[in-house]
Image (cartoon, helix red, strand yellow):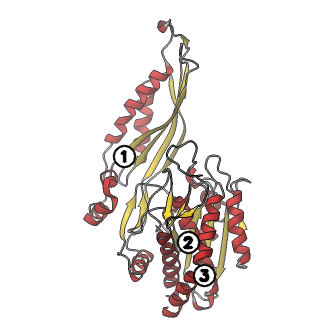
Amino acid sequence: MNEIRQQILEWIARDEKDLIRFFSQLVQCKSPNPPGDTTAAMRHVQHFLKEQNLAYREVNARDTWPNMIASFDTGRPGRHLMFNGHLDVFPASNQPGWTDDPWSGKVADGRIWGRGTGDMKAGLTASIFAYAYLSRLRDQLKGKISLTVVSDEENGGEFGVGYMFKKIEQEMSADCVISGESTTPRGVAFGGKGNIQFIVQVATPGAHASAPFKSANAIRIASDIIRDLDDLASIPVHVPEKMALILNDPKVQELMGAGAEYISKTTLNAGTIHGGAKVNVIASDCAFEFEARIPIGVDPDAVVERARAIVARYPEAVITSLSVAPPDYCDPTAELATVLQDTVESLGRPRPVMFVSSALSDCKYWRDRGIPAFWYGPTPVAGTANESVSIDEFLNLVRVHSLAAARYLCK
């Protein structure tokens, strides 16, 4: 393992400019979701794999939302490790605060700048290069290594990882998964909160604003429902004892900072609202999108049942487009988790703590099948203006993904 480690570190040091260039160019490949078109970004990834003589194949649910899998077998019995990452990112839209082109991929001040740097093109680049480095060392490793690069993660993955599991489940099954999702270099995420998303549509007869006796206002009804949905946060949380010990660990609390108090609470968000025709007309229509983000220990069915009961108080309203993703987690003491922690520490950095993220990811598809899946990525910056990742953190990700996978596959 010492020789493998030294070789990987030499390659990364030699390839530093190429790594930064690839990452920067990947950011320049616009892939906001919506609309979710990742074709340019996927071409960039596949061009690199072709240069490395690494085979891959696409498994696509939609033409402009490509997914791909690459795999190689060492020829010796062993375990199957899989890298996973997504190409789609949050839209930049008209978000205030940007001082440069959100898709510039600019390299300046020791950082790479642009939408999607943290979520998750830094981590994805680390996994892609780790996969390439390990392919050169296959004669010294055991088992099988795979890389999945997908679309649609920002929407829940139905047409990304979810679709791939439907079509090629056997190939997608692994002994463990590494993802470079935006977490923090100080932690390894072994789980995430769940979410329940739905649309509430309100319809009334409508009327001229001078005749309020003729119709209720759909927008006012919607606002009343949004207020009443606050009650979802009161549903009891029953955190398993072992999980509570982890979540209440002072190191985890310090890591989570201001977000620590919310990791075991249900949080609510009315994300969009649309309705009405003009200012002097009583609104006859209104629709809003709502999300309940639920922690480990909350029954998703109980949340859905109460949400339906709340909306049912208003005969003008109905819930549509309901989707449910329960909280997910895997064993924080699984071998790969320890390997990741040991690897980070061996590189002279503080040993990362195991924690549960408030975000969701494609890892749920593996965790729901009992397969350990862990995030180790850069400092969280997703969705912020002037999104960026430090070059130091980025190169550390490449080292950690490569060395941890090699160590796991040497046993």
User: Which residue does the numbered mark 2 point to in the structure image?
Assistant: 126
Place of residue 153 in the rendered image (x, y in percent of width and height, measured from the top left): 57, 55
Chain-order first, disc 3 or disc 2: 2
Q: Is the residue 21 above or below the residue 79 in the image?
A: above
Using the rendered view, name the quadrant where residue 45 is placed: bottom right
Q: Is residue 72 above or below residue 329?
A: below
Which residue is depicted at the point 36% across and 68% down? 354
Identify the mark at residue 17; answer none if there is no mark.
none
Residue beneath disc 1: 266
Q: Quadrant of residue 117?
A: bottom right
Residue displayed at 41% across by 54% down: 358
Report the side of 356 relative to 7 (left or right). left
Q: Position of residue 393 (x, y in %)?
A: 47, 70
| Mark 3 to mark 2 CA distance (whole Å) | 11 Å
Q: Is residue 52 above or below residue 250?
A: below
Q: SS of the residue at dot 1?
A: loop
Q: Earlier in the sequence, mark 1 or mark 3?
A: 3
In the rendered structure, which amino acid carries the disc numbered 1? Thr
- Return the residue at label 3: 133
